[in-house]
Every structure is written in C-alpha cells, then in structure tokens.
Image (tube, coloured by chain):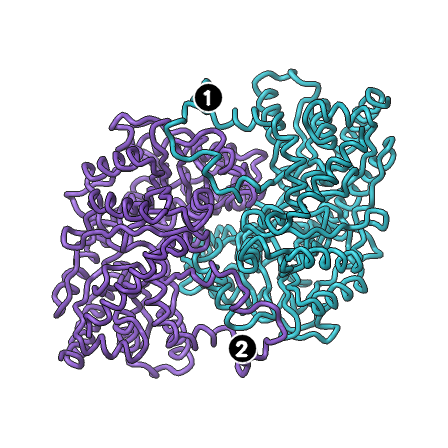
Chain colours: A purple, B cyan
Amino acid sequence: MRRFVADKAKTLINRSRTTCSSSSPITTSTSVLQRLTSSSSQSPAVLRFLSTSSDSMASDYSSTPVTLNNVNPKVLKCEYAVRGEIVNLAQKLQQDLKENPGSHPFDEILYCNIGNPQSLAQQPITFFREVLALCDHPLILDKSETQGLFSADSIERAFQILDQIPGRATGAYSHSQGIKGLRDTIASGIEARDGFPADPNDIFLTDGASPAVHMMMQLLIGSENDGILCPIPQYPLYSASIALHGGTLVPYYLDEETGWGLEVSELENQLKTAKSKGINVRALAVINPGNPTGQVLAEANQREIVEFCKKEGLVLLADEVYQENVYVPEKQFHSFKKVARSMGFGEKDISLVSFQSVSKGFYGECGKRGGYMEVTGFSPEIREQIYKVASVNLCSNISGQILASLVMSPPKVGDESYESFAAEKEGILSSLARRAKTLEDAFSSLEGVTCNKAEGAMYLFPRINLPDKAIKAAEEAKTAPDAFYARRLLNATGIVVVPGSGFGQRPGTWHFRCTILPQEEKIPAIVSRLTEFHKQFMDEFRG
Amino acid sequence: MRRFVADKAKTLINRSRTTCSSSSPITTSTSVLQRLTSSSSQSPAVLRFLSTSSDSMASDYSSTPVTLNNVNPKVLKCEYAVRGEIVNLAQKLQQDLKENPGSHPFDEILYCNIGNPQSLAQQPITFFREVLALCDHPLILDKSETQGLFSADSIERAFQILDQIPGRATGAYSHSQGIKGLRDTIASGIEARDGFPADPNDIFLTDGASPAVHMMMQLLIGSENDGILCPIPQYPLYSASIALHGGTLVPYYLDEETGWGLEVSELENQLKTAKSKGINVRALAVINPGNPTGQVLAEANQREIVEFCKKEGLVLLADEVYQENVYVPEKQFHSFKKVARSMGFGEKDISLVSFQSVSKGFYGECGKRGGYMEVTGFSPEIREQIYKVASVNLCSNISGQILASLVMSPPKVGDESYESFAAEKEGILSSLARRAKTLEDAFSSLEGVTCNKAEGAMYLFPRINLPDKAIKAAEEAKTAPDAFYARRLLNATGIVVVPGSGFGQRPGTWHFRCTILPQEEKIPAIVSRLTEFHKQFMDEFRG
C-alpha cells in the first residue's frame, strides 16, 4: 500500500513533468498531496471566517462576483503549509481549551510548526529593545529619568541612529532601499563578517526576508517557462512565491543519507531535465543553514555551487537568514558572497543575492519584520528595475530597518551593555543547541524514525517509516500519510508540527518538521508525550 | 505643436486600445509618455548605483545572466512616478548642495512630491509614540521613572495592548491577519465611525495600504484579460500594481471642470468599451478623498457608485486612506461600507474592500508601515484564499499593527492625554487646511494655471496651459511637457512636484501634483519662488 501511494505520487509527478511547460513539477506534486489533505481540513479553516454568520453556506454568496472559478489561478495553486491545515486545527483546539478546559488530553497547544521564538517565551535582547523604544519616542532622550531606565550605550546608539535619519523623522518614508546611514552600518557589518567589501548601495532593506524573495521572483519570472532551482525539502515560501508569480519550481533533492547533502551532480541532472522540457532556468535557491533540514553547508560544497551558477549563468539566491544559528563546533557559516569573492569572482562575475532577516538568529524578532537583501552582480539597468519595484511599496518599516542595523552591529566589548548582551546571546544559543540535541536524540530513539542532526537553523526534520496500515488509513481519510500522523499527534498531545509534504520530500518518504524552540523546561514533557504517542500510534498500525 | 503631441498621445492610446486584449490602454499610454521622458533621466538613476564603480559601463556586466531582454516584462512595464525621474534628479541636486553649497540658486530641496508629512518636520502625535515605545520595551512599564516620562493613559494603553498579544510577545509573528485584540479595537473604531457593525475577522492588518492593494490585485488578476476600472488621474500604486500583476487598467476620467467629479455615465461608457474588447472587468477602484485630485465624494455620488458595482458585479476597491483629511466644511467623509449598508446592502450583497493606512490622516506615520483592509462580501472559500496569500508573508509588523489600532481608538475625553492629543490633532489639521488654501490661491493666480480646491487628502493638482513653444521645447528634450515644466521648476527653485503624466490625465492637458505639506512658515517663500519661476518660464515660452 505504501508503494501504491508512492507510485501514485510518482505517476503524478511524472505526468506533470511531461506537461511541465505548463506547470511546475514540484508545485503540482506538492499540491496534489495537499489537495488530498485539504478536504478534511476545509471545515476548521472555513469556520474561522464565520464567527458572525456561522450558519452561512458558500452558496449564500451567490450574488457576489468573486468565485473559485474566476479568481487568479496562481493564487489557488499557491500552498503554504507552515500555516496550513494542521495550524488551523491547532487554533481550533486552543479555542476549545479556552472555552472548555479539560476537553482534550493536554492543557496547552505547543506550536512547533514555525520558527517564532518569542511566541514560545524567548525574551527579546534588551539592548535592541531599548534602542527601538528610544527611537520611537525620542522626546525622552534628554530627560533625566531616561538615564535611570536605559543603558548609556542604548541612549548613545539612539542618538547616532536619529542623526542618520533625515530630519530625525522615524515616522517618515525613507529612501526606497532604506535609510542610507543604516545601510552603511549593515555594509560595515557584512565587511566585518566576510572580510570583503560591501556597498551600502547594494543593500535593500525589507519587511523581513519574504518580501525580498518575492521581489527577486517577480524580477526573474516572466512566465511558466522561467524556472527556479529549489531544494527539496524547501521552506515553502519558495514554492509559494514561484506559484504566485507563475513560474516553474525545478526541484533538486537534498540527500538525506549524507546529512541532507547538496550534490552538484543532482543540480546538473535537474537542470538538464528542466532544459530538455523547455524551461529557462534563471536562478538557484540555496538555504544555508537549511530549512527545514538544519544542515550547514561545507565551504568546499559552497565553492562547487558558486562554480555551477557561474558556469550555467544562474542567479544565486542565497537564503542566509539562519547565519547566526549554528550549533555544532565542526561547522561554520560562510556567506556565499565571501565564498565567491574568495574564489576571485568579483561584482561583475556572478549575480548573487543574500537574504537576511531579524526574525531568526538568537534575537528572533519575527514581529518586527526587518530584513535586507544584498544584491550584487546585476547591471545598473537591472538594479534600476529592482529599485523601481522597491519604490512601489515606498519603503520597509523604520523600526525593522533600525533593528536590521542593530543585529549587524551589536554592542562591542567595552560598551555598557556588552556583558549583558553577550550573556543573553550565549544563553539563547547554548540553550538552542541543547534543545536541538535532546529532541534529535528523542526522535532517533523512536521506532521507525531516523533524524539528522540540526547543525543549524531552528528545525529538525525526522523521517518516519510509516507502517502500511497507517498509510492505508491515511488514504481512507483522504490525507497524506505524514499529515495523518501530524494530525493524530496534535489531537493526542497538543504538539503542532508541519507534515513533510508541505516542504516536499522524496516520493514515498514521510517526514515532519519540528522546531527546536519550546522552552527548555518543557522539553522533557514534550519528549515523553511524543514518545508515548508514537508508541501507541505504532502499536495501532504496526501491521 | 501642442495639438501634435496631444494627437500623438491620442493615436497611441487608440492604437493600444484596439490591441487592448494584450495590453492595458492607460498603462500603455502612460508608459509611452514616460518612455519619452526616461531617456533624459537615465543618467541620475544609473549614477546612484555606481558609487563604488562609477567608471563602469553596463556592458561590463555582459557575463551576468539578467538583462533587460530576459527580465519579467511586467516589471519593465511598471511605472511609479512618485519616486521617478524628478525625484532622482532632486536627490542628485541635494547631494550637490551638500558637497558644494551655493552650487544652485536655492539652498534646500523642498520635497512636495510625496505625502510624507514627517519628512517635512511634522511632529508625531505624542500619545501614539509613547504607547509604541512602551510596547517595544515593556520591561520599563513597572519602573517608577516611567511614571515621570510617560502619560498615565499611555502606560495603561500599553498594558491593555500587551494583554491582547499572546504571551505579551511583541517580537512574535502574529496571526496572519494581525493580532486579534487589535482587530477587535479597529472593528469597534469602524463601528463608531459608521454606525454599522464591523467584524474583526474582516480586518487584515498590513504593512501600509500598498501591500493590501497588491493582495487584492493578485486575487483578482489572472491574466491581461482581467481589468480594473481606475480613476484618471490616479495614484500610480494602482497602475503599477495592475502592471506587475499583468492585468489591464481600464481608465475612467474624473471631470476636472466639476471639481474632479466622478460621473457614473463615464463608468458605464468605459465598462462597455472594455467589455467590447474582451476585457473582463473585475473591480472598480475609487480613491476618496482623491489622490492626486483632493476631491471628496458626495454621499449621493457614492450611492450611485455602489449601485453601479452591484449592478455590474464589480468588487468595489475603496481607497479611504485620507478619511481623516477633509478640509472644507461643506464636505464630509463617508465610508463606502457605511453608504452601502445604509442603502440596505448587507454582507452578501456587495463585495467591498476598504483600505486604510497609518501613513495619512493627521498623524502621517508613513515610516511605521501600518494599515489594514476591511474585506466584506466575499465567500468563505475566497476569504480562505486571501488568508493564504496573507500567510505567505506571515504577518505585518507589530508596531504598525499597534499604531493602526491606536489611530482607530485615540484618547477620549477624560483621558490624561486627551487635551494634548486634541490640540496636536487640531493644530495639524487646521494648518493643513490653511496651507491647502494658500497654495491653491497661489496656483490659481499664475498665468495659464487653474487649480481645483483641495477638499481633502494632501495634494493639489493644478492644470497648466503650457505655451506651444514650451511643448515644442519639451519634445526636443524628449520629455513630456509637464515633466519638462517640473524639471525646470526643480532646477530653478528646488521645489519637487510630480508631473501629471505620472498619474494619467486627459490627453493634451498638463498638470502636476504638489503636496500641501511644507511647513507653514516656508509657504510664503515657496509661493514667491514658484510665482517668480512661473513668470520667467512663461516669459521664455509665451511665443
């Protein structure tokens, strides 16, 4: 039966590949699986919109003009599992628990579906918040009480930042790329990180990394014939953005057996296949450290990737938002720009975009929506087009811009805040490393589960060897086997994970993504709930 | 000669209309005019990106893969004049002035191109900033010094808001539509404004109004056959967004002679014409109060518009971001939702989206990127699609969300901040009204210039009857006549306005948009500089 589903998925993938000029292979295969899962999830998602009219049926809207038949088909095609059906169910259960405590076999929902550290009680870095508050309300900067409330270096930094903003106006639209002085700070931070020059005119500040990724997809995708090479598994922002822009996702599979290795031979094969189908592959997206896989690329591997992009004329889209999240001593983050420059490739040799976000790192300031992309190796005419697209939305939010400058230029030895800052940072990162290890060990000890190490990022992506009987039950429930497992897990334990089918996976394999973010003191309980659930699940379906 | 240009523009418009199924009539006509202007503006825009390699030529990038020939053609088509060539020139002149004071016949650049009040020294509303600072750094809420620095009601409000945020985590991603408690506050504010119920589940908080407009365009536009009725002149976010999403802008002309009146007969004619060309018109965009025109629609007119949308099955996209900017006693803002509900149209009778922003109003918090759309009259399935698209970007920034709740729920009589808040608000709005009147009178007194009243919003859109000789000179300079005038104005006075061709205008008429935002004490100097320039310009070209 497992083979049946796997074969079915393969057939669907192959079928879509043969007609690939009109649809993305992986998007199609993913959405096929997701369509299977969505029928059972329809109700909670729909219910959420009907609080004032819960008796309504869709047909009551028959006189309104927009229907599933005339909405943009690209929107229909787009999927985003990180906030998909399992999360909708979780929100419903949370509401249940609030209204009827004791109505489920757990007393809280544990959101392990999304890299959102502060939602799980991680505290913000004090220095960053001090500076943001002072920039929000500069009138207090000169008041004596302020000295007692804020660190001296946060006050000094707020003054410096305000001096960089024309008219000190934190409430004004900035330059479309972001405030020049903040881009100077970020460029210096990149130089310090890489040991190679960075130009503030290459920096585009954005509301988190997502809009930056959309901007590049918008630039590169003109039609379904334009393809983007994306890792499988991948963070579904990529598949969603490619679907919304009407392009084709060209998958390359990461090799689970070698710790989610990225093989250039796989890139070459997939590129060749895509080309033979008339796809014009424009770019290679690489997520390093990996999401959902947690792998950190070796420098030698990065060099091969740069060579490949150079040789094949591909833009290298480097998602480097987890650059500060590396947990193993044997690995280190190297930016693709540093790697390319150290190979002797200059500004005019390779087109490279690096994405960074304030949502990740040890600070995890997701709600601030700050980030930037560093755009190198594009001609002035193309830069002008990127600038124009940025201009249509005027600018990113100024608090996010300020925070992006702070994370690239934190307190230094000798600053008043340095010690407390360093302690906060070290406390978070070492705890994340411990949590990653504990959860990895827990997953690995489960029957039929293998789990690669989280070298970096914020996730584990364990593989579950599901019994045939479970796969059959999933099919009967019209859901993907991994979604079936995730749903059972949620209903039994309150733990929210994302099924692997939301990220893509080799046909016939099943995974889920679980963040390493729950509070450390809760981890033992999570491990025991999970272990108990898994044992019962396997007992129920073990053949 | 003027007729020649006008005829040429008309021919181009007609030509594009006859082939209209493959391109937008107005986008094409606009971009034709803008293409005329762009050759002369190429250099400053390009120069801005070359600070580290100013000797580079585009050809040096010959080995990079992205070129104007293979970039997404929709991006090439998109134009956004509010930050276009004149602004690029202004930034260059500003740099000149910094490096060589006295190098131009003025000592500062006056940015009247964009509704960005705080960039022109408008101060933020104190209460709003107090609350934002406290939410950014809640650790100080309990400190005794805080009582001395912040108003009691801002502290109380910050506590209330933090209580509405799960885990008090202002650094966490929120629900994709925004924090539920803040949406409750906004819905109450809408109810208080309209006297009709509002549902928090209808609110989608966004990073300013622009992403909300993009989201709706993305939903409605599947191909170039999908059309959106847009006013001409229009705020170019609409033309840009339609171009980026590959749809067709179906223009309807506002009637300058009747104070930029919106005639339903014009809507009917344009709809008919578009239909006859195979365009499937999906929505009507209305900007009220008007941008760039400043008109405030009469309620009776709004009723006709609602009737028209209902009859023709169009989504009504109501840009209501200037709802608090009305300057004349004879006009009042009415939301389209209030108008529709007062006509008896309920949730299931009409599809209506209202856009609001924290960038406008009397607060002008552009840099905070806060806003929302209220989405009514869409079936649950379609709402789910909108929710999915919102989810892909996770959420809007939390400070912007908080601010959106504050502008819809400001201090009330009896609150500690009420008097200072009311004084700040009244001070700004009355000053804006005076500035609007002074500038309107100044424009109207110029030779060959007529200027409608700014009833609302932040702009005047005077019409210039340019002498034939000026039109000829513009043609020789390969620029649109209004861009020629705006460029001369900038070079002579440092005043930055946006040529009417960036908004669309009746062929053969020429305008520019000028904000009413310069500091009041600077207005007399602006008027005299402008008057002197205009006199000299007319003397030079009067023929």
Q: Which mark is residue B57?
A: 1
Give coordinates of residue B45: x percent, y percent.
55, 28
Is B174 in front, or is A33?
Answer: A33
Q: Tell me the residue that label 2 is attached to.
A: A58
| Residue type (three-letter) at the residue carrying disc 2 | Ala
Gap between marks 1 and 2 measured at Cα: 58 Å
> Left or right: B477 with respect to A184?
right
Quadrant housing residue A9: bottom left
For disc 1, the chain is B
Name the residue: 73% across, 66% down: B306
| Image side of residue B150 versus residue B419, left or right | left
Task: Give the left or right position of residue A429, taking residue B182 as reference.
Answer: left
- Label 2: chain letter: A
Say which amino acid is labelled 1.
Met
Horizontal and vertical percent for residue A39?
39, 75
Q: Quadrant of the C terminus of chain A?
A: bottom left
